[in-house]
Image (cartoon, rainbow, N blue to C red):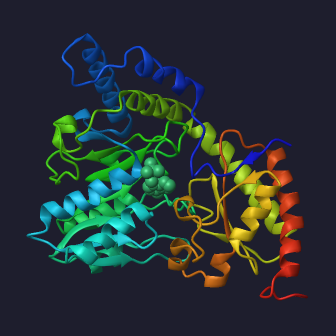
Amino acid sequence: MKPIYLDHNATTPVDAEVVEAMLPYLNVKFGNASSVHSFGRDAKVALENAREQIAQIINCEPSELYFTSGGTESDNLAVLGTAYHLKNKKNHIIIGATEHHAVLESAEYLAHHEDFKLDLLPVNREGFVSPAQLKELISEQTALVSVMHANNETGTIQDIGALTKVAHEKGVLFHTDAVQSTGKIPVDVKQMGVDMLSLTAHKIYGPKGIGALFIRQGVKIVPLFYGGSHEKKRRPGTENVAGAVGLAKTLEIAIKRMQADFDELSKLADYFIEKVTASIPDVHFNGSRQSRIPQTVNLSFEGIEGESILLALDIKGIACSSGSACTSGATEPSHVLTAMGIDKVVAQGAIRFSMGRSTTKEQLDYVVSVLMEEISRLRELSPVYRKGK
Ligand SMILES: Cc1ncc(COP(=O)(O)O)c(C=O)c1O
């Protein structure tokens, strides 16, 4: 069997139509969008068309959309940029306890180096934060709240509208990391009521190295880079025109396919969860069965470290992830799962299977058969698995 890729939350292959749309802006219309000659003008037109198209999809004005190098940069710009702007007036920041490292470490930097007080908004067993708890944490000093839309490890989808309402009642800005949700479920900045939103292309069959940050008109941030007037001085640097065109095309395709992909992935994920839990004892589903991006299936196999399972599956041609892809290599259990109150040992046995457009039922049947063999073999070797249960 050909290798099976079940790590779509880490990244995805680029859609052929996206490559086709980008290609002219790499080799023919390659101009610098800041140049005044015809090459530059062609590039500028493509850049602004892409901006318009993306703005329409997330329901904002093109002037509110800033191209970046991806989710990490957008998150950093939102968190640090807002904090630096407000730091002489406010010094408190609240983020979800299960945020991606791009938000988490930006906020931790502020706490360690800029005298900010950082509060982590707790989550329940399924990974949901509570608007009431957010209300309690907000103070006169709160500069920003950042809570992600869909979690990268569990897929849990937060009710962002309910959270922005609480933040705005108290006059506090709200950022959401929508890297894992944009293009998979509806993302409408007006309906969500967010002040800032991060998105990226490579999680939805677009190229790596391009993303965007929505910044609502009137919201002020300090840039992180200096050196040019690109992106209205908020993100200087020669624009990635091919990337922007690719991002627009990626989103156009994702929107067209959204419902069909959602339905198909829900069916496949349900099938997989039922089959794994019926075939292997002591497996726990982590997250919410009801409200999650369906391609994400996070399962803990008691008594075995996720890394061992990951390697065993890799040898059999199956690619998945233990914890977040960005932190793989770390042996500590995922901060997402421990924040959800999952026992450290159970969290250590977690594997994230993330499905995509190429995933088939036949592939999943094969994965289950490999899991049955490998989990039983690894448990035989495990000093912690309670044998004879
Ligand atoms: C939720 C979330 N935020 C941010 C990022 C970082 O995005 P990028 O890889 O585009 O920098 C990721 C990628 O893993 C993610 O899953």
**Relative to 10, is 15 above or below?**
above
For the point 88% across and 58% down, which residue is it? Answer: 369
For the point 84% across and 78% down, which residue is it? Answer: 379
Decide which of 243, 86 is in the foreground and name it: 243
* Res. 343 visible in picture: no
Say left or right for 343 vs 138: right
- The quarter of the image holding the N terminus is top right
**Relative to 295, is 94 above or below?**
below
Decide which of 164, 352 is in the foreground and name it: 352
For the point 88% across and 80% down, which residue is it? Answer: 380
For the point 52% across and 30% down, which residue is it? Answer: 253
Which quadrant of the view contains residue 106? bottom left
* Res. 132 visible in picture: yes
Horizontal and vertical percent for residue 146? Answer: 33, 64
Horizontal and vertical percent for residue 335? Answer: 51, 74
**Relative to 25, is 378 above or below?**
below
Say left or right for 114 vs 352: left
Which quadrant of the view contains residue 231? top left
- The quarter of the image holding the C terminus is bottom right
Horizontal and vertical percent for residue 74? Answer: 33, 51
Decide which of 25, 139 is in the foreground and name it: 25
Q: What is the count of numbered marks?
A: 0
- The residue lying furthest to the top in this view is 38
